[in-house]
Amino acid sequence: MLEVELKFPVDDLAVVHDKLVALKGVPTDAVSQADAYYNHPSRDFAQTDEALRIRSNDDASFVTYKGPKRGGVTKTRREIELPLAGGDRDGWAEILTSLGFAHVATVKKHRTPFALTAVRPRSRSTRSTASARTWSSDRSPAATTHSRRQRLASRRMPGSLACAP
């Protein structure tokens, strides 16, 4: 699957919330997520522009590989995401570290997705989501390299907005 994102730093999420509601956006259930990022034992993901993470949210966990970003205005990359049976993130974390992968950072987010209906000329309406979120980061003492994404997250941005078709 290809992931296509546009991300924007936001100073005041309340303003974004009000604009989304004005556009007839419908907020869905808020979710808390923790993304544990790992670095490959023989190649530096910061150099290859890849990412490997275990994401845990309120009721499920997933392991995700993200390939290098493609050029262009959007952040577009290959993404492979698989659910973890029974949400067993700790077991997968142990497997990865046993194989030599290093835990480099954990990024915690709180998201409130909004469902939007966009009307395009000469086409049917399409549904998109906009996700408003706040960030925080817990770094591992063993962390030595961080991808650009992890460095941005560790700056404790007051909020951001991500949109995906």
Image (spheres, grey):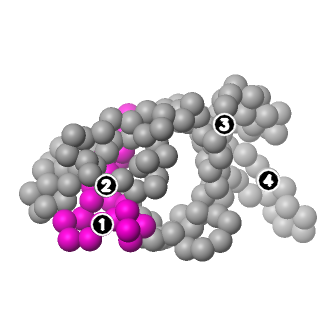
Residue 87 in the image: above or below residue 31 = below
Label 1: which secondary element:
loop
Q: CA distance from mark 3 to mark 4?
A: 22 Å
Quarter of the view holding residue 67: bottom left
89 in relation to 4, above or below? above
- Verify CB contact (< 8 Å) between mark 1 and mark 2: yes
The residue under label 4 is 118
Count residues near mark 3 (Cα–Cα under 10 Å), then give few for <14, some for 14-19, many for 20+.
Answer: some
Callout count: 4
Check residue 64 in the rendering and tell me which mark sits there, or answer none. Answer: none
User: Could you tell me the amino acid type at mark 4?
Assistant: Ala
Q: Name the residue that disc number 3 marks.
A: 10
Residue in the picture at 64% in, 64% down:
74
Furthest residue toward right: 121
Residue nearer the viewer, 40 or 109? 40
Residue 117, percent from left and from top: 76, 49
Q: Earlier in the sequence, mark 2 or mark 4?
A: 4
Q: Nearer the viewer, mark 2 or mark 3?
A: 2
Q: Which residues are magenta?
A: 34-59
Give the residue pinned by disc 1: 44
Residue shown at 30%/39% (left/top)?
A: 139
What is the CA distance from the residue labelled 1 to the residue labelled 2? 8 Å
